[in-house]
Amino acid sequence: MARDEGARLHIEVVYCARPGHCDLVTLQLTEGGTLLDAVRSSGLMQRHGLDALELRAGIWSRVQPLDTLLRDRDRVEIYRGLQVDPKEARRLRYKSAKGIKST
């Protein structure tokens, strides 16, 4: 079966700059569009001052290479760097909870 030359992909691109604040852009790309194409087309890199060289992104919560081909209805997610090492955060939570219990 031949594919339609004008086939369009309906894509969502999401970036959470901080907890509780999500920026969602819905767009259409031509078939054969990549993860990087979606991120660039969304305008979120410019809006949030993201660096293309340090960009980490994925599809449906799974980190993917930027040249990954997209499928219709994919959700592209741009990931921000961690503010605190998860092990350190757990240690601090444990330490503060321990202090609360002992008083």
Image (cartoon, rainbow, N blue to C red):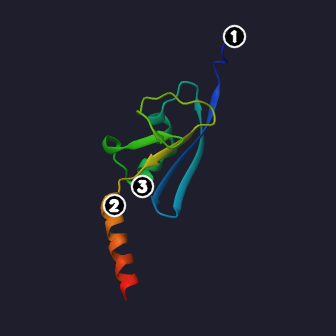
Residue for point 32% across, 44% down: 54
- Asked whether 84 or 89 is in front, the reply is 89
Residue 45 in the image: above or below residue 5: below
Mark 3 → mark 1, Cα distance in angstroms: 42 Å
Name the residue type under label 1: Met
Name the residue type under label 2: Gln
Q: Comparing marks 3 and 2, which lies closer to the viewer?
A: 2
Q: Which residue is mark 2?
A: 83
- Total numbered badges shown on the rendered structure: 3
Any part of residue 58 in sight:
yes
Residue 54 in the image: above or below residue 67: below
Percent across and percent down for residue 12 are 58, 43
Percent across and percent down for residue 82 are 35, 56
Horizontal relation, residue 87 to residue 32: left or right:
left
Residue for point 36% across, 85% down: 102
Q: Comparing marks 2 and 1, which lies closer to the viewer?
A: 2
